[in-house]
Structure formats: structure tokens, C-alpha cells
Amino acid sequence: MNKQERYEKVLTYFKNNVPIAETELNYSDPYQLLVAVILSAQCTDKRVNMVTPALFEAFPTIETLANSSSDEVFTYIKSISYPNNKAKHLVGMAKMLLNDFGGIVPGDIDELQKMPGVGRKTANVIASVVYDKPAMAVDTHVFRVSARLGLTMGAKNPLQAEQQLVKNIPQKLIPIAHHWLILHGRYTCLARNPQCVTCKLQEFCKYFEQNFLKQKVSTNIKVKLQGYGKKTLKKAVKKSTKKAGKKGG
């Protein structure tokens, strides 16, 4: 199957089976989402959701956060990754948001990235979730899943993966596609122990084809050809795996 067909089949599967997909971070307004996404860098959403209730109770508005110190913020987020840096980023972000943007979280990706603690991934999340813009935030899950499914080819970094995904996914689906890929990576296409046997995307998955389908064919051939010479065995395995690759697309 060609690239366009692969995209169509993967997106159709998600549309039919995961009609509702959204961030698992808890928030009630753009300010809270921005804080939560900054905290989620190299940290799980589950852990972030454990600390944000008390954090938002202590700093319910941009003004209260901007007028606080990083030491004060640290006491509420010390259980997550890199709390010292993130505390400084949150206070700096709030000050800039208040002074440069009138207390309104911007929707422009370049403007968002001017704030402390806000990289391209975080900016894309805000633009997508808050403003429903066709922005694709590529985290480790999106990067891994898109590569394994064959949606991105040869992408060496998140930006290259983002560019390929945005180019090939219909604009209206980009916001939800971000969540589809994240959730699939979080619960099925795990980094170290992907649930390939039960995954419903086997048929379209390059990773499954290369690591399970061909391996299975190779094993079956080796069993059938026990007793034959090494050259015969090697030739048979190569021929069979090539056929398997053509079937898998």
C-alpha cells in the first residue's frame, strides 16, 4: 500500500473506533492548560494531575502566579520532574503573559514560544487544544507511533515528523489525530513492550510487519528446512520474508 492509502486506513480506523480523543491533563481554562503542559515535559499526565489541584488553588490566576516566587511554586510541584526549572519557568511565563499579552494566552505558535518553558511541542498543544488550529504536537508517543505505522519515513527529529504528519493529514483532523497517536502510544504501542498481538492496526503497521510477521515466517521456514544446508536455509528465509513484506505493504 502506498503512503496515501496507509494514512487513509489508519485515520479511518481511529475515526471509527476512537471518535472522542482529548488531552488527559485536567484543566478548566487556557491558563491552567498552559501550566499543566509545561509541567508535563518529561513527566506523566497522571503525575501532573496529582499536583495541579493544590497548585491552582494556591495560584488560581495568572496574576497570582506572576506575583509569586519560584520557591513558593516549587513546594507544590516538587514531586514532578525538574521542579526547580519548571518553577522558574512558570513564574517567568506568568509575568510575560501578564505584561506582554495582557493576561491572554496567545494562539500564535511563534508568540507562545517566546515565553519561558514553552517549546514548539507545548505551543502546538495550546494552539491545537485551545484554538483548534491544525497544529501537530509531536511528543515521544507521537514520534514513535507515527514511525512504526509508517506514517513518517526517515524523520530524525520531532520537527521532521511534525512536517510530514501535517502535510499528509487533512487539516480538520490534525487536532484530534494528535490525541489519537498519543493515546495509542500510551496504551497500546508502548515503547518497550508494544501490544502488537492485540493491536487492531497490525494490518497497516510497518513495525509489526518487520518485527513479528517476518520473524514468524522466518521461524516457520527454518523448522520446515531443518537438516538442509545453511545456504539453502538462508535463501528460503530471504525469499519468504520478501513475500511477507509485499503482503504487508
Image: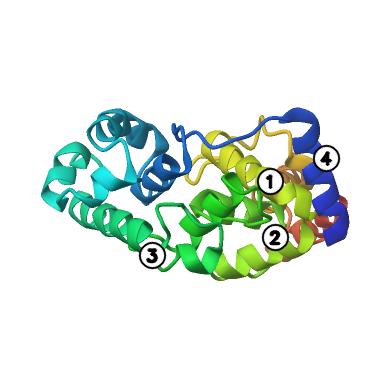
The residue under label 4 is 12
* Of the image marks 1 and 4, the number of the one nearer the N terminus: 4
Location of residue 212 (image quadrant): top right
Labels 1 & 3 near each other (Cβ < 8 A):
no
Q: What whole-number distance in Å separates the C-alpha atoms at marks 3 and 2?
A: 32 Å
Residue at position x 57%, y 56% in the image: 143
For badge 3, the amino acid type reads Asp
* Circle 2 SS class: helix
SS category of the residue bearing label 1: helix
| Along the viewing direction, whichever of 18 and 22 lies nearer the viewer | 22
The residue at 36%/31% (across/down) is: 49
Mark seen at residue 165? 2
Looking at marks 2 and 1 on the same chain, the residue that comes earlier in the sequence is marked by 2
Q: Position of residue 38 (x, y in %)?
A: 37, 51
Q: Alpha carbon of mark 3 to alpha carbon of mark 4: how far?
A: 42 Å
Q: Amino acid at mark 4?
A: Thr
Is label 1 or label 4 in front?
1
Work out whether mark 3 precedes mark 2 in sequence or the reverse, and give the earlier one. 3
| Rendered image: mark on residue 50 | none
